[in-house]
Image (spheres, rainbow, N blue to C red):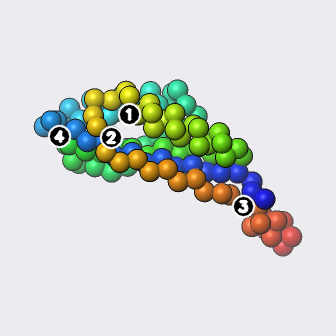
Amino acid sequence: MSLGYVGVLTVRVEMPWVSNLKEKRALVRPVVERLKSRFPLTVARLDGLDAHDWEVIGVATLSNDYGWVQETLKMAADYIAAEGEYTVVEETVEITVIGDDDFEEEEQE
């Protein structure tokens, strides 16, 4: 039996036509901020912060409902793909079970 699920989505976006970091941030940052405000998610720019033509966006959520985690991450991925002026080149979803076995052991101690 599980206590819940942690879902993590990572999305690599590329924009080879961008020539500087300021221009890239102007494309990526608004999407990240709108994603945070529209969905119950934690969102961060994870990698490629010093590169002008690509970046990795990370998204995480937590729930006791596996289907909800899965659907929320899918909506986030669709939103990222649709809202930005970049190309999504890689997308990874990981959903981890939070077990209550460890919780029961801690209670007994």
User: Label 4: few (<14), some or many (≥20) within 10 Å?
Assistant: few
Looking at the rendered structure, which numbered label has been put on residue 16? Answer: 4
Q: Is residue 63 visible?
A: no
First in sequence: mark 3 vs mark 1: 1
Q: Is residue 68 left or right of residue 52?
A: right
**Mark 2 or 3, which is nearer the eye?**
2
Circles 2 and 1: CB distance less than 8 Å? yes
Q: Secondary structure at mark 3?
A: strand
Disc 1 designates what residue? 81
Question: Could you tell me how far apart the alpha carbons at marks 2 and 3 are, in whole angstroms?
Answer: 33 Å
Quadrant in which the N terminus appears: bottom right
User: Label 2: few (<14), some or many (≥20) within 10 Å?
Assistant: some
Disc 2 designates what residue? 88
Quadrant in which the C terminus appears: bottom right
Task: Please tell me which residue is depicted at 31% across the width and 45% down the height of the picture.
Answer: 89
Which of the 4 quarters of the picture holds residue 103?
Answer: bottom right
First in sequence: mark 4 vs mark 1: 4
Question: Could you tell me how far apart the alpha carbons at marks 4 and 1 are, in whole angstroms?
Answer: 16 Å
Amino acid type indicated by mark 3: Gly
First in sequence: mark 2 vs mark 3: 2
Circles 3 and 1: CB distance less than 8 Å? no
Q: Secondary structure at mark 1?
A: helix
First in sequence: mark 2 vs mark 4: 4
Disc 3 designates what residue? 99
Amino acid type indicated by mark 2: Val
